[in-house]
Amino acid sequence: MRMTERPEWGELATFVPNKSLPVHNWFYYKEGFSRDLVARLAESFGLGIGDTVLDPFCGSGTTLLACRELGIDSIGFDVNPVAIFASRVKTREYDASMLREAGRALLNRKFQKPFGDVPGAFVRKAFNPHTLDDVLFFRDSIMAMEDAVIRDFLILALMNVAMKCSYAWKDGAVIKIRKHPVPPLRDMLRRQVFRMIGDVERMKKARAKCTAEAGDARMLKLGNGAIDAVITSPPYLNKIEYTKIYSIEEELFFLKKDITGLRSFVGTEDEKIASERCRFADVMDDAGLPLAAKAYFNDMHQVISELARVCRKGAMVGMVVGNGCFDDRVIDSDIILSRIAEKLGFEAKEILILNKRWCTRNRVEKVGVTRESLLVWEKR
């Protein structure tokens, strides 16, 4: 398979370009990629009206929203309820006048100290007590609204500003608490709500179907040959535990759940995995791999097998992945995943190297260079 350096595309593999884009920036999703990457791949793959794009790790909906802007149908799945919620809110159609009326009514409400369930100790630690009372007051006020579409829109706005007005800081897979002065939540919420309504009014609308559902990428709820292209980014090997860093949002705005599926499972040491010969043993020697790597590639073998099932012949796949950084080695996930794909019915056409970073142990000792790559496959 061909490997090509594409450093000029490096920032496109991050969420950073989305921070200045309307609607895309309604919910900051650190693990996401950019709208422009989706647009470039859609053009490269020759996608248009009537085609359907799948993102089995849809996160906060960048692929879905970008496809809707382009008039391309899309389907997304994720196991994280926060991500699915953000995806649905960002990709809906809205009546801006109704949102504006509901927003004004909400923000004109007189504060009343909330009663009911008290958040856990970690959530309480993450907020000034007065700010937390404001969050709970507005949350309960919004939850009492009858219109589910308006309710969800306002909850996402509140979720956004609640984290901006908190002491919480997401550092990789860890939430750290740093106390500092925070702005008044009501003022922040007012700006956020009406900025989002302005985005709704300005957003380019295209006729395209768009769905986001809770689902495991290893067991897709799709028919055979239903998909024309895949644009996605799975969890990186040994990189981030996706289900932990949104725990504050989950506790404040959703029922607590045990999240299972690829995002939460990858990187765990599982005794069953350790005792079995890996499914990908025919494409590489797995004898010395860490348990976390065996678990990861076993899961990804199932994911790619499902992609092969749901993709039509000639369907294209664009997948952003990162190599694994361990104390004793770098594991070339981009090459291994492409070899697995070749065995499961794809032609691995190219590996585009977008970014390179040092893998270190003990913060300073260099182990090797890891690549962040865009894998381009075609269904045979």
Image: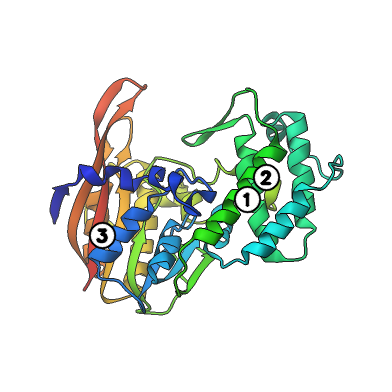
Question: Which is nearer the eye, 216 or 229?
Answer: 229
Question: What residue does disc 3 label?
Answer: 340
Question: What residue does disc 2 label?
Answer: 190
**Residue type, label 3:** Ile
* Mark sitting earlier along the chain (1/3): 1
Q: Is mark 2 on a helix, strand or loop?
A: helix
**Residue type, label 1:** Phe
In this view, the mark in front (3 or 2) = 2
* Mark sitting earlier along the chain (3/2): 2
Question: Which is nearer the eye, 173 or 70?
Answer: 70
Q: Do labels 3 and 2 touch, CB within 8 Å?
A: no
* Residue 358 image position (x, y, % from top left): 27, 30
Question: What residue does disc 1 label?
Answer: 194
The quarter of the image holding the N terminus is: bottom left
The quarter of the image holding the C terminus is: bottom left
Q: Is mark 3 on a helix, strand or loop?
A: helix
Q: Which residue is drawn at 63% across and 44% down?
A: 191
Q: Residue at x 34, y 41 (%)?
A: 290
Q: Do labels 1 and 2 touch, CB within 8 Å?
A: yes
Q: Do labels 1 and 3 touch, CB within 8 Å?
A: no
Seen in the picture, residue 280 relative to 147 is either above or below; the reply is above
Q: Is mark 1 on a helix, strand or loop?
A: helix
